[in-house]
Image (spheres, rainbow, N blue to C red):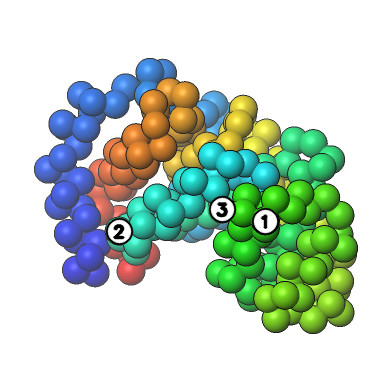
Amino acid sequence: MKKFLTALAFTLFSLPTLAQEFREGVHYDVISPAVSTRSGDKIEVVEFFAYSCGHCYNFEPLLTQWKKQQSDDVVLVPSPAVWSAPMEPHAKAFYAAEALGVLDTLHGALFAAMHIDRNRLASEDEIRKIFVANGVSAEDFNKAYRSFGVGSQVRQAGARAKGARISGTPEMMVAGKYRITTRKAGSQANMLKIADYLVALERAAAGGNSASAE
């Protein structure tokens, strides 16, 4: 509760200044119709990413630090982009890792495989080897990766990206209402500053009701 009240006080103090700095249509876009969120009373911030994207790989450390600074009324939801068939195996890898409870380890390992080891992870077998190297049995990987649940989540991720009208990665969506792109933000650091502003807008609009999420 204390962390939330501190965030709310900061929001009310800083919002007028931020509103002068960041403008709709110039620094971020409004999504219409809005995209459904899945995080209840929390302010949902979605990161659209692709393991094959070098910009996403560079964005991860910034995003991880940003997440640590958020109040408990904010939830960050990574969402793999799926706009072509070659992206589906990577999205399935993400949701398989999540289903197996090893996402904290495998998320970084999959990025490293592609951008440090130059492994394209173009097949199920190549992806399986990354999981096995990080302590997941081949049998458990196969069951999760090929499961109906993982396939369903991949389809939902594709629909989410389509609804948000993303055009590249990384991009962000706040509360299902706002889209932030690197092109309009100007830099990845600015993407996070704009996300802070839009989170503040949502928190102020809620009138403090987000305290119920604590």
Which residue lies at the image location 81% right of the left edge and 67% below the top edge?
128
Q: Which residue is mark 1?
A: 117
Task: Name the amino acid, label 3.
Answer: Pro
Task: Name the amino acid, label 2.
Answer: Gln
**Residue 63 vs residue 197, the one in the foreground:** 63
Q: Secondary structure at mark 2?
A: loop
Image position, residue 95 (x, y; %): 70, 61
- Is residue 36 visible to the viewer in this orientation of the structure? no
Which residue lies at the image location 55% right of the left edge and 44% below the top edge?
56
Q: Quadrant of residue 108?
A: bottom right
For this view, does 93 lie left or right of residue 34? Answer: right
Q: Earlier in the sequence, mark 1 or mark 2?
A: 2
Task: Name the amino acid, label 1.
Answer: Asp
Image position, residue 102 (x, y; %): 63, 74
Disc 1 versus disc 2: distance between alpha carbons?
A: 31 Å
Q: Earlier in the sequence, mark 3 or mark 1?
A: 3
- Is residue 179 visible to the viewer in this orientation of the structure? yes
Q: Which mark is residue 69?
A: 2
Q: Quadrant of residue 196?
A: top left
Image position, residue 133 (x, y; %): 72, 75
